[in-house]
Amino acid sequence: MAYQVLARKWRPKNFSEMAGQTHVLQTLIHALENQRLHHAYLFTGTRGVGKTTVARILARCLNCEKGITATPCGTCDACREISEGRFIDLIEVDAASRTKVEDTRELLENVQYAPARGRFKVYLIDEVHMLSSHSFNALLKTLEEPPAHVKFLLATTDPQKLPVTVLSRCLQFHLKNLSPAQIVAYLQSVLIAEQIEFEEDALWQLARAAAGSMRDALTLLDQSISFGAGRVESVSVASLLGTPDFTLIFLLIEALAGRDGHEIVRLLGLAAENNPDYQRLLEHMLSVFYRMTLAQMLPDAVDNSEGDRDRVIALAGRLSPEDVQLYYQICLQALQELTISPNRKISFDMGLLRMLAFSPDVFMAGSTAGEKKKPELSDSDRSSDQIDVPVSDDSQALDNLTVDLTSTLETTVPDLVAESVEQIEITENNVPEDIDWYTLVSRCNLTGISGNILWNCVPVVATVAHYALVLDENQSALFSPDHPAMIATALSEYFGRDVKVDISIGQISMETPATRRRREKAEVMQALHKRFYEDHGVMALVAAFDATIDPESFTVKN
């Protein structure tokens, strides 16, 4: 069988396989589940973020032989033919090569005819902004009054070039650039499935080079596998991409923290051997200093989007906030000087040497080579609560000090208890605090994707401080590792105590809060219909004025 490039082989076939874009997927999934389908969808975003992929998955959702669904089966003839690009009722057009009005009219001349095999006739027009103004005029008429069996899926990297008359007739979804962390996670899953050895640092290099594009990342991964003879290693990837080794930045900052001038000069020499992009090195150094400042002020706010969280936090603990702020300013100045400097290497080196030379303690000591010295305090500088501890060669003084501190702690610090809690098997109406699970979920008032996840979970085991939940596998497309912590926060606020939450994905036989809410809403709607149609006054109005009742006008609040 001919080799298939990774970007095509690993193209997602359903929403659950998509990386990121939860804001788009959530809207589409809810629309499909509630049968609230628009006739035209516009997907925008930069290259390789999944515009065409989402459109093809949506086409599969609309034409799956098992019915309109957010989770197409993937096995029926329609699903397979759409995946293979041979479904007769999916008409894909590259607008960049068919810009003339004659091409558009030819494309739309069969719109009025029913689909040959599928439920809908789907027109997928890629790079739609390339159409001429006359072509847009020809398309506009059909967008205004489309047949019920037709759906338009438009994709573009430049929505500003579309006429507002077209934009106003489409549901618009903007797909964001993927973060390096999302790309790395996806590349890892691909390499594990392909049974290819890799180094995680190499994947971070690929993710940064992809600049938010998953397709570019997979293409670079293909290239890296070939270049590395079946392995993906940091050294070979750096050589292939021609990008600077950002590990050098951390080594330089570590040398700064240790006030080791000789090591800084050695590292600068190593950097020069590879003729790096000094501008990118300084830009990345600025980013590291920013993240170090964040780590010093709000450690929990430092994410792992660059794969360096632990290292950033460790470095932030070795330098004072004043040092980090000074280094950031010097780095920014070096970056500005780089554009006018006749020698970029010297500008980069001078920036690092300034950071070392003007570090407060080094500057005051007048030395750049030794270890960081602590300034001695005069008697007038000492505060009243400082204690002088005499130092002697005899270790007895230190032993006595240790005993005194230990005895002091024993009298002032109470013993800590680890409470053991008996686990309780949970049934539908057996939840701690004498509140059924549906009521508890309702009262938490958790919104957004995390709220949607919680509404589709059922408890399996619960303790006073721990909930083990199972998420309906049909709703797992939007799940991410961040959601358990968000749900735990909501439950903790509700109960007034710390609650830990674990979530697994599986088949659920019992009724989730979401399905119960839909059931109860349907029952209320059914009762409302019955009461309305049995009302003698309403029926008299219908008979007197030959009126009809619009079922869509019935609404029930959630």
Image (cartoon, grey):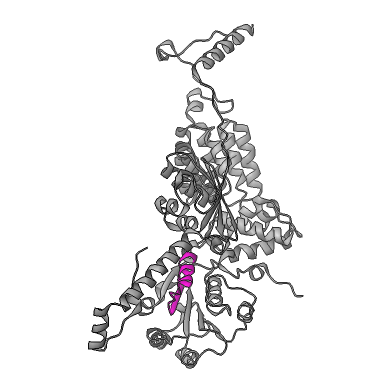
Name the quarter where the C terminus is drawn: bottom left
Q: Is residue 166 left or right of residue 540?
A: right
Residue at 34% over, 70% down: 555
Residue 483 location, x and y as percent? 51, 52
Q: Quadrant of residue 418?
A: top right
**35 in the magenta segment:** yes
User: Of 196 and 269, which appears nearest the observer?
Assistant: 196
User: Of 323 and 183, which appears nearest the observer?
Assistant: 183
Residue 248 location, x and y as percent? 61, 44
Q: Is residue 165 left or right of residue 109?
A: left
Residue 287 location, x and y as percent? 50, 47
Q: Is residue 379 above or below residue 474?
A: above
First to last magenta residue range: 25-42
Q: Is residue 16 left or right of residue 329?
A: right
**530 in the magenta segment:** no
Residue at 48% over, 34% down: 323
Q: Is residue 466 above or below residue 58?
A: above
Residue at 61% over, 39% down: 251
Residue 83 location, x and y as percent? 62, 77
User: Of 217 and 42, which appears nearest the observer?
Assistant: 42
Circle count:
0
Q: Is residue 120 above or below residue 377?
A: below
